[in-house]
Amino acid sequence: MDELDSYSRTVVAVAETVGPAVAALAVGDPENPRGAGSAVVVRDPAGDGAVLVTNAHVVARTRSGRATFADGTHADVRVLGADPLSDLAVLAAHPDADTPSPVTLGDAAGLRVGQLVVAVGNPFGLAGSVTAGVVSGLGRSLPTRDGSASRVVEDVIQTDAALNPGNSGGALADASGSVIGINTAVAGVGLGLAVPITTTTRDILDALRREGRVRRGYLGVVGAPAPLPVDVAARLGRARGLRVADVVAGSPAARAGLRAGDLVVSADREPVVDAQGLQRRLFAGSIGRTLPVTVLRGQAMVDVLATPTELGA
């Protein structure tokens, strides 16, 4: 008689699929590394090898460490790149290391509130720990900062699967065993957050692997979501835009003629309903390129042409 119900069988299957590829990560001095969090083996998009993904805050400013897997094997790793503004980092294992098979990366775009998720990590140094729960919220925001630059990680996954110190950088998987998030924060009792695996996330990971950093465009606007007038909302098929609260003097936005009070409805011909919608248009490909921005100014739609500079350059 099968003593496992359907729920248990699903969690067990996910744990057996994902668990071997989730490592306890220690960083810093090779002779005396400190426990930091977790890391997940993923396929290297450039070839047949594998790299590891974790949180930027887990590696902090260190450049090397050791990943220890649930079966007791370990691999020395070096940091290829870390991006505090997305809280993601990519590690390379030593060429002679025998790392487990990589996980399958899924797509968080199709997640629904109430969906089963399984978190795998190494809380308090307890390797291969597994907790299960549901997606308890979507579209959450996680403020991050890198020096003088700040950003909001968009569409963060909220889950009630128990996360504890050491889970950061671990895997959040769906019922099929696909990893749809990288656990990043414990926001309170029964509340954990994970950076979603999306097209944007994959682009960030690829940039970190190839270049060691993520280049972003800079416009120089501060804004917040705001409702569109009823007639404009009906015409555009959406209810909100991004109200410009401030424009930084001398910034690309200021040179383009954007003004405080403008209501941004699109950038690069794509809809904008919040700050994240604008941020999505400001990766490396936007730098030095003319970026059309459409705003509602008073009763008129106005097109402005901005040329983003590189953030931090």
Image (spheres, grey):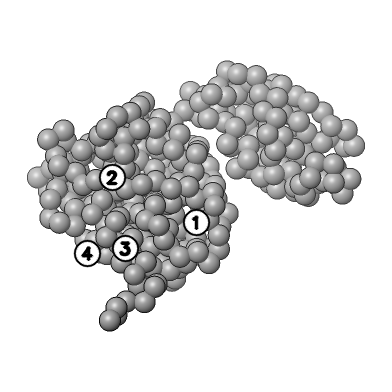
125 is higher (above) or lower (below) than 56: below
Q: Residue at x 47, y 28 (%)?
A: 215
Q: Position of residue 238 (x, y in %)?
A: 76, 47
How far apart are the two marked residues, 3 and 4, measured between alpha carbons?
20 Å
Q: Nearer the viewer, residue 181 or 17?
A: 17
Q: Amino acid at mark 3?
A: Ala
How far apart are the two marked residues, 2 and 1, measured between alpha carbons?
22 Å
Which secondary structure lies at badge 1? strand
Number of residues whose C-alpha sits closer than 10 Å to that of mark 2, classed few (under 14), some (14–19) or many (20 or more): many
**Quadrant of image for the N terminus:** bottom left
Q: Which mark is residue 126?
A: 4
- Of labels 3 and 1, earlier in sequence is 3
Q: Which mark is residue 157?
A: 1
Q: Confirm or deny contact between disc 3 and disc 1 (CB under 8 A).
A: no
Left or right: residue 81 compared with residue 152: left
Number of residues whose C-alpha sits closer than 10 Å to that of mark 3, classed few (under 14), some (14–19) or many (20 or more): some
How far apart are the two marked residues, 3 and 1, measured between alpha carbons?
22 Å
- Of labels 2 and 1, earlier in sequence is 2
Which residue position holds label 2?
102
Number of residues whose C-alpha sits closer than 10 Å to that of mark 4, classed few (under 14), some (14–19) or many (20 or more): few
How far apart are the two marked residues, 3 and 2, measured between alpha carbons?
16 Å
The answer to which quarter of the image holds residue 304 is top right
- Of labels 3 and 4, earlier in sequence is 3
How far apart are the two marked residues, 1 and 4, measured between alpha carbons?
24 Å
Which residue position holds label 3?
13
Left or right: residue 127 compared with residue 157: left
Callout in the foreground (2, 1): 2
Callout in the foreground (3, 4): 3
